Protein backbone atom coordinates (compact mmCIF):
# COMPACT_ATOMS: atom_id res chain seq x y z
CA UNK A 1 0.00 0.00 0.00
CA UNK A 2 1.48 3.36 -1.09
CA UNK A 3 1.58 6.19 1.46
CA UNK A 4 0.12 9.58 0.52
CA UNK A 5 2.24 12.72 0.43
CA UNK A 6 1.34 15.53 2.86
CA UNK A 7 -0.14 18.56 1.05
CA UNK A 8 1.24 21.06 3.60
CA UNK A 9 4.69 19.73 4.48
CA UNK A 10 7.47 17.84 2.72
CA UNK A 11 6.75 14.45 4.27
CA UNK A 12 4.43 11.45 4.09
CA UNK A 13 0.90 11.92 5.45
CA UNK A 14 0.76 11.14 9.17
CA UNK A 15 -3.01 11.60 9.46
CA UNK A 16 -2.87 14.80 11.54
CA UNK A 17 -5.81 16.32 9.54
CA UNK A 18 -4.21 19.79 9.67
CA UNK A 19 -5.00 20.10 5.95
CA UNK A 20 -8.72 19.77 6.77
CA UNK A 21 -8.86 22.71 9.23
CA UNK A 22 -10.70 25.89 8.16
CA UNK A 23 -8.35 28.81 7.44
CA UNK A 24 -10.77 31.33 8.99
CA UNK A 25 -11.93 29.34 12.04
CA UNK A 26 -9.33 26.92 13.45
CA UNK A 27 -12.02 25.19 15.55
CA UNK A 28 -13.88 23.99 12.43
CA UNK A 29 -13.19 21.44 9.70
CA UNK A 30 -13.26 22.86 6.16
CA UNK A 31 -16.70 22.48 4.55
CA UNK A 32 -15.74 24.15 1.23
CA UNK A 33 -17.85 27.25 1.93
CA UNK A 34 -15.42 29.42 -0.09
CA UNK A 35 -15.33 32.38 2.30
CA UNK A 36 -11.54 32.15 2.52
CA UNK A 37 -11.34 32.40 -1.28
CA UNK A 38 -13.37 35.64 -1.47
CA UNK A 39 -15.61 34.16 -4.18
CA UNK A 40 -17.96 36.69 -5.80
CA UNK A 41 -21.51 35.92 -6.92
CA UNK A 42 -20.80 37.52 -10.28
CA UNK A 43 -18.00 37.81 -12.82
CA UNK A 44 -17.17 40.42 -15.44
CA UNK A 45 -15.58 39.93 -18.83
CA UNK A 46 -14.48 42.57 -21.30
CA UNK A 47 -15.55 42.15 -24.94
CA UNK A 48 -13.05 43.60 -27.44
CA UNK A 49 -14.91 42.91 -30.65
CA UNK A 50 -18.10 41.29 -31.91
CA UNK A 51 -18.04 39.41 -35.22
CA UNK A 52 -21.29 39.40 -37.15
CA UNK A 53 -20.49 36.51 -39.53
CA UNK A 54 -17.92 33.76 -40.10
CA UNK A 55 -16.11 35.59 -42.94
CA UNK A 56 -14.84 38.21 -40.49
CA UNK A 57 -13.59 35.50 -38.15
CA UNK A 58 -11.73 33.77 -41.00
CA UNK A 59 -10.06 37.05 -42.09
CA UNK A 60 -8.88 37.66 -38.51
CA UNK A 61 -7.45 34.14 -38.23
CA UNK A 62 -5.43 34.44 -41.47
CA UNK A 63 -3.58 37.57 -40.30
Image (cartoon, rainbow, N blue to C red):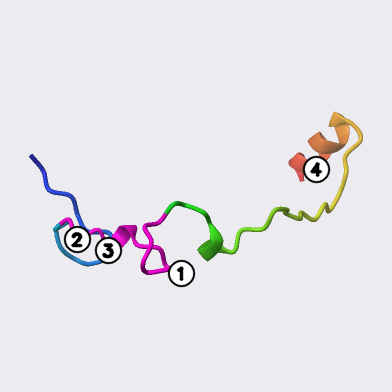
Q: Secondary structure at mark 3?
A: helix
Q: Which residue is mark 4?
A: 60
Please tell me which residue is depicted at 19% across the width and 61% down the height of the picture: 16
In this rendering, position of residue 50 left or right of residue 29: right
At a point 36% along the width and 57% down the height, the residue shown is: 29
Find residue 25 and report its horizontal and vertical position in percent: 43, 68
Residue lying at 12% horizontally and 48% vertically, measured from the top left: 3
Where in the figure is residue 47, as x and y percent of width and height?
82, 52
How crowded pointer 4 is (Cα within 10 Å; few <14, some 14-19, many 20+) is rated as: few
Q: Which mark is residue 24?
A: 1
Between 18 and 58, which is closer to the camera in this rendering? 18
Q: Residues within 10 Å of mark 3 (few under 14, many from 20)?
A: few
The Cα–Cα distance between marks 3 and 2, rounded to whole angstroms, is: 5 Å
What residue span does the magenta drawing correspond to? 15-30
In this view, 26 is above or below 52: below
- Do labels 3 and 2 touch, CB within 8 Å? yes
Q: Earlier in the sequence, mark 2 or mark 1?
A: 2
Residue 51 placement, left or right of 41: right
> How many numbered marks appear?
4
Q: Quadrant of residue 8?
A: bottom left
Q: Which residue is mark 2?
A: 16
- Helix, strand or loop for disc 1: loop
Amino acid sequence: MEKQQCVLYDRECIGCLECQICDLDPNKFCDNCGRCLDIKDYATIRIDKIYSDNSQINKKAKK
